[in-house]
Image (cartoon, rainbow, N blue to C red):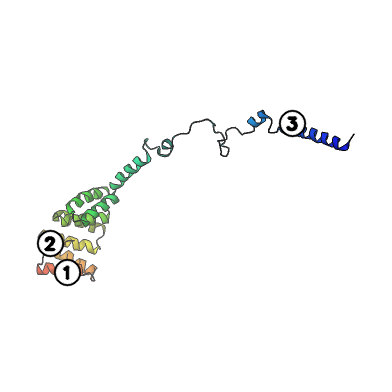
């Protein structure tokens, strides 16, 4: 037998045996089963996924946050409203109104803030200023007295109480507090000028 013919025959038989052993591409059953189950088309395998399951719309998975069934945008709106009603939120809104000289409106917001935190010095100071500059001098005096109960050594509280008492015609009490303000902060021209105005009966200024 010709060695060439024998070698060719053996090569063909080896190829056929290898194809049977490995399940070549010509085997349609093997081709169908070779793709991993649960693998999304064009992507990496997704363990446990159902290949033909319809995708869930993004709005149903990304906008719900689980709090009362509100969407995230709705919850942000609620949070913003709640923030506006915190002592800090009310204080900031009140200061903004005073910056535009809307003192009476500012006093309404700051009253609510003081109701939530009655011993917060920054709130009482702003509320007293709003009262004073809107002409509510009795309320201003009472508010600055509350502020002095928290910090008796606060120069501004003595100054503001003195100004409020002066508007109520209580000159002697006003002079006492203005002198205390000057003593506690001798470098302040604001406090010194207020005391000088009281002595010289000059018109008051805004706090």
Q: Which of the labelled discs sits on residue 4, or is there none?
A: none
Q: In the image, is 32 to the left or to the right of 170?
A: right
Circle 1 or circle 3, nearest the eye? 3
Q: Nearer the viewer, mark 3 or mark 2?
A: 3
Q: Earlier in the sequence, mark 1 or mark 3?
A: 3
Q: Please tell me which residue lies in front, 170 or 14.
A: 14
Dot label at residue 166? 2
Q: Secondary structure at mark 1?
A: helix
- At horizontal 21% and vertical 66% (from top left) the residue drawn is 181
Residue 118: percent from left, percent from top: 25, 51
In the displayed image of the protein, which residue is found farthest to the right?
Answer: 1
Quadrant hosting residue 160 = bottom left
Query: Circle 2: is it few (<14), some (14-19), or many (20+) Cα within 10 Å?
Result: many
- Image quadrant of residue 149? bottom left
Question: Label 3, on which residue?
Answer: 20
Distance in Å between CA atoms under marks 3 and 2: 110 Å
Seen in the image, is 117 located left or right of residue 103?
right
Q: CA distance from mark 2 to mark 1?
A: 14 Å
Quickly name the residue at label 1: 193
| Residue drawn 80% across the image and 36% down it | 11
Please say if 157 is above or below 189.
Answer: above
Outermost residue to the bottom: 187
Task: Name the spot of residue 99 as percent of width and height, x first.
Answer: 22, 57
């Amino acid at each position: 037998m010709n060695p060439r013919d024998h070698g060719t025959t053996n090569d063909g038989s080896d190829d056929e045996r290898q194809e049977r052993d490995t399940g070549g591409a010509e085997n349609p059953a093997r081709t169908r089963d070779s793709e991993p189950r649960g693998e999304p088309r064009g992507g990496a395998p997704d363990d446990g996924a159902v290949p033909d399951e319809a995708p869930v719309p993004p709005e149903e998975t990304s906008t719900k946050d689980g709090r009362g069934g509100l969407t995230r945008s709705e919850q942000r709106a609620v949070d913003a409203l709640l923030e506006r009603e915190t002592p800090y939120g009310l204080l900031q809104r009140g200061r903004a109104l005073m910056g535009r000289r809307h003192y009476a409106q500012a006093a309404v917001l700051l009253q609510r803030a003081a109701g939530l935190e009655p011993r917060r010095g920054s709130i009482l100071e702003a509320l007293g200023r709003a009262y004073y500059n809107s002409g509510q001098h009795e309320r201003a005096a009472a508010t600055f007295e509350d502020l002095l109960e928290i910090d008796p050594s606060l120069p501004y509280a003595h100054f503001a109480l003195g100004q409020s008492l002066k508007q109520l015609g209580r000159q002697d009490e006003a002079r006492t507090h203005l002198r205390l303000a000057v003593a506690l902060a001798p470098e302040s021209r604001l406090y010194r000028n207020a005391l000088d105005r009281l002595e010289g009966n000059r018109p008051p200024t805004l706090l």
